[in-house]
Amino acid sequence: MDEWLTDEFGKRYRMRGNIREYEMMVSVAGGISIPESQLEEYHRLQAEVARQAREKQQKAVPLKACPFKNGVDMACRADCMLRTVHGCAIVYLVDRAPTAAQASGRSCPFNPYMCRGEGCELWRGGCVLTAI
C-alpha cells in the first residue's frame, strides 16, 4: 500500500501513477467527517468513552437529602453551588464525625423533616457543623 500524503488543503491522498487518489471521508454522528482509515479508531474511542461514562455512573455516590432544600434551593439539584463531586461542599469542608458530647441529645438546626440522620448530607453520626 502506498504512503498517505497531505495536500495544501490538509486532505490525505496517495499517488497512483500520476493521479492523486484522495482518501474517502466517512460522515459519523454529529455531521463529523473523518478519513476512512481512522474509522476503526473512532469507534474504539467512542466505545472507551461510553465505558468510562458507565464506570463513572456506577461509582457515583447516591445523593442524600440537603437540609437547605426548603430554604435555599427548592429543588437542591445536582448543579447546586454547594454540591461537589464529594457531596455537599459544607460537609466536605468539615467532614469528620462530631464527638459524643457534641452529638448527644441535640437536634439539627435545619429543617427536621429533611435532616434526619443517615439520609442527610450533614450527618456523620451527628450534625457535622458541630464538628467545626
Image (spheres, rainbow, N blue to C red):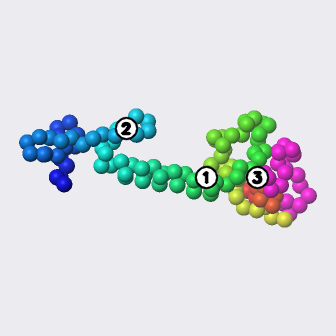
Q: Residue furthest left?
A: 18
Q: Residue 122 has which mark?
A: 3
For label 3, count other residues whose C-alpha is less than 10 Å away and answer few (under 14), some (14-19) or many (20+).
Answer: many
Helix, strand, or loop for circle 1? helix
For label 1, count other residues whose C-alpha is less than 10 Å away and answer few (under 14), some (14-19) or many (20+).
Answer: few
- Horizontal side of 31 relative to 3 (left or right) equals right
Closer to us: 88 or 93: 88
Closer to the chain start, of discs 3 and 1, is: 1
- Horizontal side of 3 relative to 109 (left or right) equals left
Q: Residue furthest right?
A: 105
**Disc 1 residue type?**
Gln
Closer to us: 120 or 98: 120
- Horizontal side of 87 relative to 112 (left or right) equals left
Q: Find the distance from the CA under tag 1 to the CA under tag 2.
A: 29 Å
Residue tagged 2: 27
Q: Residue 57 has which mark?
A: 1
- Predominant SS of the magenta segment: loop
| Residue 86 seen | no
Closer to the chain start, of discs 1 and 2, is: 2
Closer to the chain start, of discs 3 and 2, is: 2
Question: In the rendered structure, which segment of residues is drawn in magenta?
Answer: 101-120
| Residue 112 seen | yes
In front: mark 3 or mark 2?
2
